[in-house]
Image (cartoon, grey):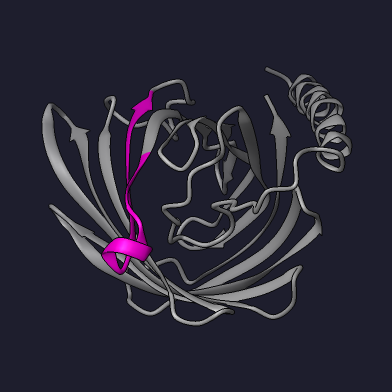
Amino acid sequence: MTTQHHDAKRHAFLIVLAVLVLPLIVAAITAQADTYCPERPGVANSPCIMPKNSLSVEVGLTTFTHDRPRQFSFADTLLRLGIITDVAEVRFGWDGELYDEQVSGAGDASLGAKLKLLHQDTAFFDVGMTASMVLNVGAQRFSASGNDPSLLLMAERDLSENVVYTGNFQVGFEKDHGRWLQDDIWASQLGVSLTDSWGVFGEVFGDFGDERPATVSLGGGATTLLTENLQIDFSFGLGLSAAAPDWFLSTGLAVRLPW
């Protein structure tokens, strides 16, 4: 494929994305005004469930990771559709368009479901669980070897009117040359609401697993609600261990729509 052909496909992709995303932003201004809880931008996820017949579209516009090799991603996307208010939602994710120093291509997709198990008014913590499975649709460079399953446990507690703690632990399995290897991810986050529309957070996170060194990183960021249904965000992270990426920067947005 020639460079001009590749660039033409990229430009067409950007135009299609803009055509799809801009109407979503406009629609978000008039969507329902319940409390919105996007999972962007931190590593730690909240047990919060989307209301029934409500769709959250959460897009990482750009993410730059300084590592070996350096990597850039565009338009990683998560769709969350509420099916039972405060109980269950279904999810579809895509890793976006990925670039490293040698090649570019589409990332894998994923399909899953999220359940709310406990509420802090009766059990001290809000507790939830997400089960998901990788769908191998990405370019060979960026695609998993199998339909890797994972199970994520989430706990959250309001420490005050403006401060919330969130903790996650995920058990995942990756297929590598016919063998299943375990990969576990953990995250601990503290979020602070500065105003009705502005919030900041800080977190520590990492992973460990079979036949790979453990990683530890520190991250943080800020979010702002432009409307009750449209959030934009900025986040960053620094590697604290030799095996972790050196640092990363990310920006994104989330919009909520009636279904």
**Quadrant housing the N terminus:** top right
User: Residue 79's spot in the image, x, y percent?
Assistant: 57, 33
Q: Residue at x 87, y 30 (%)?
A: 23
* Foreground of the two, 234 or 237: 234
Q: Residue at x 74, y 54 (%)?
A: 231
The question of residue 123 being in magenta is answered with yes
* Foreground of the two, 252 or 119: 119
**Residue range (magenta):** 115-135
Quick check: 131 left or right of 249? left
Residue farthest front in this picture: 122
Does 97 sit above or below residue 217? above
The question of residue 163 being in magenta is answered with no
Quick check: 174 left or right of 255? left
User: Residue 241's spot in the image, x, y percent?
Assistant: 33, 77
**Quadrant housing the C terminus:** top right
* Foreground of the two, 164 or 175: 164
Q: Residue at x 75, y 40 (%)?
A: 32
User: Residue 83's spot in the image, x, y percent?
Assistant: 49, 27
Quick check: 228 left or right of 105? right
User: Residue 49's spot in the image, x, y percent?
Assistant: 48, 44
Q: Give the main secondary structure of the magenta stretch.
A: strand
Callout count: 0
Q: In the figure, residue 196 lies in which quadrant?
A: bottom right
Q: In the figure, residue 129 lies in which quadrant?
A: top left
* Foreground of the two, 235 or 193: 193
Q: Residue at x 65, y 37 (%)?
A: 57
Does 228 sit above or below residue 149? below
